[in-house]
Image (cartoon, rainbow, N blue to C red):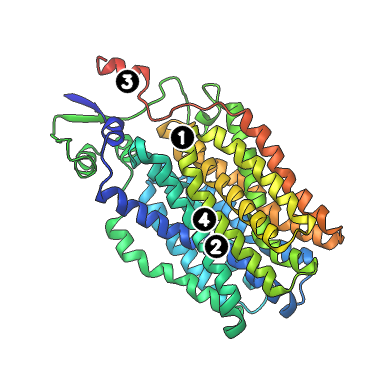
Amino acid sequence: MQRINAVDILDTAKLNRFHLLLVFWCSFIMLFDGYDLVIYGSVLPHLMTEWNLTASQAGMLGSSSMLGMMFGAIILGTTADRFGRRPIILFCVALFSVAAFINAFAFDATTFGICRFLTGVGLGGVVPNLVTILKEMAPTQYRNRLINLMLSFFAVGGLLSALAGMYLIPLLGWHSPFYIAGLSLISLPLLYKTLPESVAYLVHRNRHEEVGKLLQEINPNHKHSKQIRYEIETVANTAGTSMASLFSDARAVSTVMMWIAFGMCMLMVYGLNTWLPKLMNSGGYPLGSSIAFLLVMNIGALIGQLASGFVADRWGCKPTLLVFFALSAVSISLLGVRPGPVTLYLILLVAGGATVGCLSVVHTLAADIYPANARSTGVSMAAAVGRCGAVAGPLLGGYLFSLSLPFEQNFLLFGLPGVVAVVAVLLISQRHSNQVSEDTRLKQGV
């Protein structure tokens, strides 16, 4: 019986139609992730007026989707290591599509909050699995760039939501952007037909015939036969469940620091996307201009996410995060100095690019520090705990708004998490996860 390392076949494959189709579907889903989350920042001023919401109530309403994302990442993200990436992704797309569409018919804050929570559950479960499946299936040479290309569509979705806020809401009311959010449901039949299962998951379930056919499609140089048994990274010294492996083999400190980095990143991203229009409006900027600032920031987010992939491929994930987190802290703080229009737009571009660029690279780093049999759990748990920061972001904005602090202090406090994240990243020990363990190599006679 011949034993072959499936990772080597995946890593050495040339970029082909299979990879491009996978990236297309993951990017399509990420676009709606960004759209569904950022749209709240555009509708928030209108909801506060129509439903007479206080700043604290608006912050809690904004955090409902983040709380849902935390639950989704824990429950739906981690179960993918048991049930497979593909079925969890399909379920999550169905859930957030339906919930976001129903949001358009919310008649009070409670109904709106429930729909936002369910939307968040679907989004929280899908993102870690998108990162994981691309991490496992993409060739080494293109891995970081493909993951960051996929994650950059979060910013595209945010850009579209800002445009919807500027043009649709004045014409059709705040309900109209949520009709668009339901369009992702149309993709489910095609997604069901064409989305593959992860090779790593199939190997761990001993589904070798399926693995062989899939590997031949991914890498035509590989020829499958019934005498082949595929292997992938195993962790011989790790006892217990994949959850326990997050803290074994000297990964405990890195795991905790990764959670902190995720949390600080998400606090900045979701806090700003929720409260930037309202904070700028309170500083004397017209509401239309304030929503335009959200548009500019998401243009920067798109540029930053694409750039971060190329930078991470050249410098590595950890150095890239250190630079981007530092830029986040500085640029967000500078928003409070009331610069001139040109300077303000440049700062917004940097703030959007640095914060969302961090969000894409931190997912890649999380996938890199865990073994294959715990990777989805590792990324999902980091994303889940990081959602505490996402929940805190809108709440922090509401709290700061209710305090009526000087304009510049609001942004100084929003920039502080970037400093905390720099310290956390410095303490993360990076490893290369796409390798076969020593025990496996010995079995292969290498």
Q: Position of residue 161 (x, y in %)?
A: 55, 68
Point out which mark residue 302 bears.
4
The mark that comes first in sequence, 1 or 2, is 2
Amino acid type at mark 1? Arg
- CA distance for labels 4 and 3: 41 Å
Which residue is painted at 78% across and 66% down in the image?
55
- CA distance for labels 1 and 2: 27 Å
Give the farthest residue toward the bottom. 171
As drawn, 361 above or below 335: above
The mark that comes first in sequence, 4 or 3, is 4
Point out which mark residue 440 bears.
3
Say few, some or many: other residues with alpha carbon within 10 Å of mark 3 (under 14 / 14 to 19 / 20 or more): some
As drawn, 12 above or below 129: above
Secondary structure of the residue carrying numbered label 1: helix
The mark that comes first in sequence, 1 or 4, is 4
Secondary structure of the residue carrying numbered label 4: helix
- CA distance for labels 2 and 4: 9 Å
